[in-house]
Image (tube, grey):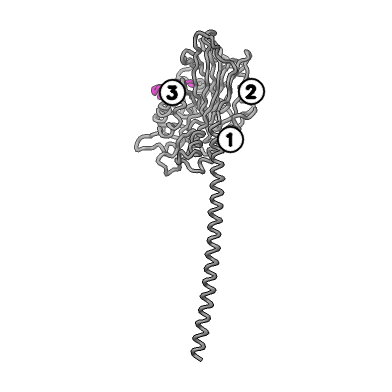
Amino acid sequence: MAKSRRRNKRNANKIVETISNETFKKIVLVIGIIMILCVGIMGVRYWQDQQKLAEQRQKLDKQIESIFQAETQQEETQEEEDTVIHMAVVGDILCGNLMLEDAKTGEDYQFTSMLEGVKEYTEAADIAIGTMETNFTQNEYSGNQEYNSPVSFAQAVKDVGIDVVSTSHNHSLDYGLDGLKQTKQNLEEIGYTIVGTKESVEEKNYIIQEVSGIKIAFLAYTYGFNNENSITEEEKQYVNVFSLEQATQDIQAAKEEGAEYICVIMHWGEVNATRASEEQKQIADSLVKNGANIIVGSHPSVVQQMEMKKNAEGEDCFVAYSLGNYISSLSSENANLEIILDIQLRKDAQTGKVILEKVNYTPIYVLDNGKDAENRYTLVDMQETARKYASGETTEITRQTYDKLMEGLEKLEEIIRRQS
């Protein structure tokens, strides 16, 4: 009887062992199939991803960021060569609180690393201009509401090639008349040429810069001020506040003084609006009608559309309603999408006439590497950085950043080419 029970138990164990082995084999088989499927799916997705990168790389290689090209060409029989110059134009130059935190090194501030990634486009130009939308006073530094920055920020911007800056903007009088004069003096000591604010009411509202023999007048105006109610009429006389009558007088005076080309820098429009307002368009029409050849705008903190207009003589005039911010730490939508314009002017050697020959742009991006990064904010060339990633030439950015750059390029193209 005992032997029978032991035999039955051994048989039962064999059955359980057999079942367990069969179950284990099935589980292993299922896991293997799942792993093969996963590897296969990953392989397909990787192949699809590589195909997408290849297509995007081809598009990036072919993309030409050209806005305008004149139809007239230089005569081959012309004895003297025409003069051709390149003017780089950037938008608002801001220094936010997060930028101040990032740049702090002991008792000093270091901003060079933020800007040097795209300096080739400003350094290579014959003249580079922008709007310095911050003050440089003895007050506490601030990157919000009342803007005030270390002089080292202005020096870093100067070191990457910016020559002429407008100081006519809604923060010009954040620190009163004394702050305005301190800012102007600090910038001039570094070597900037200033337009838009004055140390005395007798100063002209424009400047004329001779660039390779071409005399260009720069005029700069703001729509008004943030702290409008606390500013006196006397203080306003030291800032170029826009009025069509005054701008027309300034354009005429600049031409009488010998200016061959007129560039107007406008601080106008609605913040965060990627489409120019009807008021901006009307002002642009009036300025072109009264002699402006180029109008470049800022203040909205985002890029707006660009367009060509004809003046009374049938000449091509260029309007960029907003170039966004050259550098900032703003987190609002589209605020990190920027451009640098390359405006090419040609002076005919025989007639002395200056014409707009070409306008190109370089899309740039304010890259936020995170608060723990050694250099949190850096400016990058969107197209070149994306192309290098798609080609496998760099791993300095993540796929997420690459996708943001590609989305940004499409968005910029849509905004810039938008019909008014």
Instruction: Give the x, y percent position of residue 81.
Output: 49, 11
Numbered badge on residue 184: 3
Q: Give how far apart the Cα atoms at labels 1 and 3 are.
A: 36 Å
For mark 3, give the secondary structure: helix
Q: Give how far apart the Cα atoms at labels 2 and 1 are.
A: 25 Å
Q: Are marks 2 and 1 in contact (CB under 8 Å)?
A: no
Nearer the observer: mark 2 or 3; the answer is 2
Q: Are marks 1 and 3 in contact (CB under 8 Å)?
A: no
Nearer the observer: mark 2 or 1; the answer is 1
Where is mark 2, residue-wise?
Answer: 282
Q: Determine crowd level at label 3: few under 14, some 14-19, many 20+ residues with C-alpha closer than 10 A.
A: many
Disc 2 or 3, which lies upstream in sequence? 3
Q: Residue at point 45% right, 23% down?
A: 124
- State the residue in front, 290 or 313: 313
Disc 1 or 3, which lies upstream in sequence? 3
Amino acid type, callout 2: Gln
Disc 2 or 1, which lies upstream in sequence? 2
Q: Residue at point 52% right, 29% down?
A: 362
In the image, is residue 196 part of the stretch drawn in magenta?
yes
Can you tell which quarter of the image residue 303 is in?
Answer: top right
Nearer the observer: mark 1 or 3; the answer is 1
Q: From the viewer's perspective, is residue 404 above or below residue 136?
A: below
Instruction: Give the x, y percent position of residue 3.
Output: 49, 89
Instruction: Mark yes or no: residue 37 visible.
Output: yes
Task: Tell me where the magenta segment starts and ends, as one range.
Answer: 181-197
Numbered badge on residue 411: 1
- State the residue in front, 418 or 95: 418
Instruction: Give the x, y percent position of residue 306.
Output: 59, 26
